[in-house]
Image: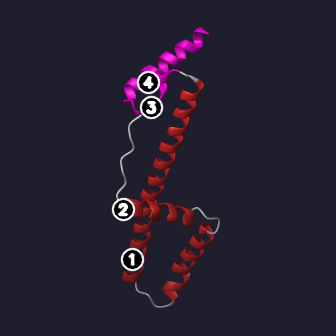
Amino acid sequence: MADMPSITGESKTIARFARWSQRIVASPFAPLVTLLVVALALFALPTLGFDAERLAQVEFGVALVTLLLVFMLEHNEQRDTIALHVKLDEILLALGADEDKVGVEELPAAKLERVRDAERRKAAAR
């Protein structure tokens, strides 16, 4: 398996922020807070005299935060997937399984499909 690249100080800060924000977003109170903020925006802002331009700016901010959340979730999912593959590779090696299967997730899609088809043929022959 290839060596993991070193993480710079800036990358560590970004990764720390991503993990912190994941804990906040994944908390059981996050949906409730979101509903309260949306309700506030829908009902309170127009009655407080905010004009349409200001409401459009709020909508833009919400869209921007949504986009950032998508990237944050992808970052965390990728990190979790890599960790899972490392653990699965370790299990394969510990069980003495075919070492060619270690790191198979890194193969191009066409080669990965050939490996899958070969495994299915082996299983059918048993």
Label 1 environment density (alpha carbons within 10 Å; few <14, some 14–19, many ≥20): few
* Label 1 element class: helix
Q: Which residue is mark 3?
A: 103
Q: Is residue 31 left or right of residue 106?
A: right
Q: Residue at x 50, y 90 (%)?
A: 48
Amino acid, disc 2: Gly
Identify the mark nearer the N-term, 2 or 4.
2
Name which quarter of the figure residue 51 lies in: bottom left
Determine the CA span between mark 2 and mark 4. Answer: 39 Å
| Residue 45, above or below 84 | below
Of tags 2 and 3, the one toward the viewer is 2
So how many labels did they put on this image? 4
Identify the mark nearer the N-term, 1 or 2.
2
Return the x and y of residue 55 as percentages of the image width and height: 42, 80
Q: Which residues are magenta?
A: 98-126
Q: Nearer the viewer, residue 14 or 35?
A: 14
Q: Which residue is mark 1?
A: 56
Q: Which residue is mark 4?
A: 113
Determine the CA span between mark 1 and mark 4. Answer: 48 Å
Determine the CA span between mark 3 and mark 4. Answer: 14 Å
| Residue 42, above or below 10 | below
Identify the mark nearer the N-term, 1 or 4.
1
Q: Which residue is mark 2?
A: 9
Q: Nearer the viewer, residue 88 or 122?
A: 88
